[in-house]
Image (cartoon, grey):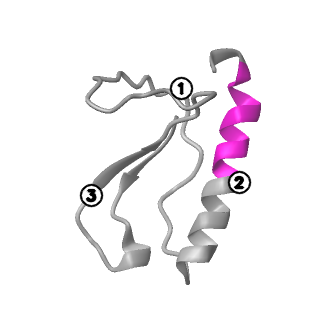
Amino acid sequence: AAVSIGPPSTFGIQERTIEAHLLADGNPDLVGRRLRLLFLARLRDVRTFHSPDALARQIARDVEQVRAEFKEHL
């Protein structure tokens, strides 16, 4: 997973949240399942983006970086 821990300040929210973008192949049914996340590395600091589209582009880059660096764990 690519995980964000911090306030989603791009949307004007200051409370800390935890969001996980799961990198599972296929479309596993995980609704109601308990998951365990192990943190392997920190990619970058939390940033505020000028638009949701800019945030989405950065998330896509983050996901690609996670896939490239941790492919043996996926």
Q: Position of residue 74 (x, y in %)?
A: 63, 21
Residue 55's place in the image compared with 19, above or below, is: below
Instruction: Name the element at disc 3.
Output: loop
26 is within the stretch colored magenta:
no
Name the kind of residue labelled 2 in the image.
Arg
* Mark 3 lies on residue: 16
Mark 1 and mark 3 in contact? Answer it, CB < 8 Å: no
Q: Main secondary structure of the magenta part?
A: helix
The label shown at residue 40 is 1
Sort mark 1 into few (<14), some (14-19) or many (20+) by Cα contacts within 10 Å.
few
Q: Quadrant of residue 37?
A: top left
Name the kind of residue labelled 1 in the image.
Leu
Residue lying at the far right in this picture: please name it: 68
Task: Point out the tag, 2 or 3, that comes first from the N-terminus.
Answer: 3
Q: CA distance from mark 1 to mark 3?
A: 21 Å
Viewer-closest of 35 and 13:
35
Residue 18's place in the image compared with 26, above or below, is: below
Q: Position of residue 4 (x, y in %)?
A: 44, 49
11 left or right, relative to 34:
right
* Mark 2 lies on residue: 61
Instruction: Name the element at disc 1.
Output: loop
The label shown at residue 7 is none
In this rendering, the count of numbered labels is 3
